[in-house]
Image: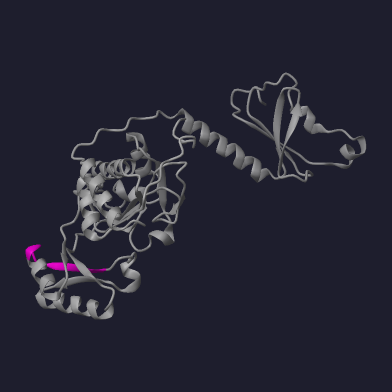
Amino acid sequence: LARHGAVDAVLVALVPTALSAATGDDPARALVPPSGTRARPLAAVLLDQDEPVRLLQGGAATVPAYAEPSSAARALAHAVSYAHWRAEPSGTVPALDGVDSETAAALVADFLARNPDGGWAGPQLCAALLDAYGIPQSPWAWVTGPDAAAAAAERLGGGRMALKAYWPGLLHKTDVGALRLDLEGPRSIRDAYTELARNFAGVMTGAVVQPMAARGIELVAGVVQDQVFGPLGVVQDQVFGPLVLFGLGGTATEVLADHAARLAPLTDLDAHALITAPRCAPLLFGHRTGRTADLEGLEQLLLRLSRMACDLPQLAEADLNPVLVRPDAVLPLDARIRLLPHTARNPYLRRLRAR
């Protein structure tokens, strides 16, 4: 079987019998080629062994033996997946225009000078960091009163508006009722601001006014690094460096957990793999609608997030959710960025980037 051209791997399940127990023979030993070489990957299943997995030794060769067939099959599947990954081309890290790393570094240094222990950046700083890396944003305005909110809505073109309350440490606006949608007209905006200020008296420092965006696919894109719980519940360690996350967004992002991740810096192939990996990917390619999303813009967003994470080691985590994707636009509607003082990396830590 191992020499047959149509066979990729051999999985041998050995079932103990009364005869083998009586004679004392160990048929598993026959699986180990004495020369130390074999034509195909070979694994054994020994249903009577106590250990979940052990190695059968035979001279210079070894054969892994598993206690359950499902464990052996999973091991072979992982080996195949790893071999395919090793065989993929590495890709290249594209050059990005419109990136102002110096301004971003100065903004982060100023924030940490005022907040030595780090913390969550406010809306203005989040927007400035996204601007420094050429990441598009929906128009918005920061306001601190009901009249200012109504005036800002008028400057932003009128129409239906969203009002988002803010105070330091606020992470999930929907969970605490700090969001008002589909506001139209100065009076409704003033009333909404007054209500939010009353509900969150003592903590609310202002609000963001933003036009309601046209419908699209809601995604999430983010970055996590330096031993923290990330925006999507991922634990990341500085051994690996920054991790770029992507998947289905909106209020159900943590419930459905349809996400993928790749190590930064992202190559062009990494960005493509991120876009196609989640289960929601067919929606981006026109499933049921026939309208393909702005895939080039989405790829640019991921590459620019990757560049931001590599440039700013103080960037502990970033969460753009939702990112509204349509055929004509890729638009983050909300951003959260957490900054922490950076400690020098141990130069002896292994970075898992090389294949």
Residue 234 in the figure: left or right of residue 318: right
Q: In which quarter of the image is residue 257?
A: bottom left
Q: Is residue 322 left or right of residue 38?
A: left
Residue 23: which quarter of the image? top right
**Residue 339 drawn above or below residue 81:** below
Residue beneath the point at 78% across and 33% down:
28
Tell me which residue sits at (65%, 44%) in the image: 71
Residue 36 pos. (x, y %): 70, 21
Residue 55 position in % (x across, y down): 72, 34
Q: In this view, does 184 lie above or below 239?
A: below
- Callout count: 0
Residue 159, magenta (yes or no): yes
Question: Front-most of 63 and 23?
Answer: 63
Whether residue 330 is visible to the viewer of this picture, yes or no, is no
Visible in this render: residue 80?
Answer: yes
Residue 309 placement (x, y as % from top left): 33, 44
- The residue nearer to you, when weighing 59 against 167, is 167
For the N terminus, give its image quadrant: top right
Give me the residue at 64% from left, 22% from top: 39
Does residue 214 show up magenta in the picture? no
**Is residue 268 placed above or below 47 in the rendered structure?**
above
Q: Give the range drawn in magenta.
A: 155-166
Q: Is residue 293 left or right of residue 72?
A: left
Furthest residue in direction right, as rendered: 22
Q: Whole-percent x and y of residue 80?
A: 54, 34
Compared across the picture, whether 317 is left or right of 132 comes to right
Q: Which colour scheme is used?
A: one colour
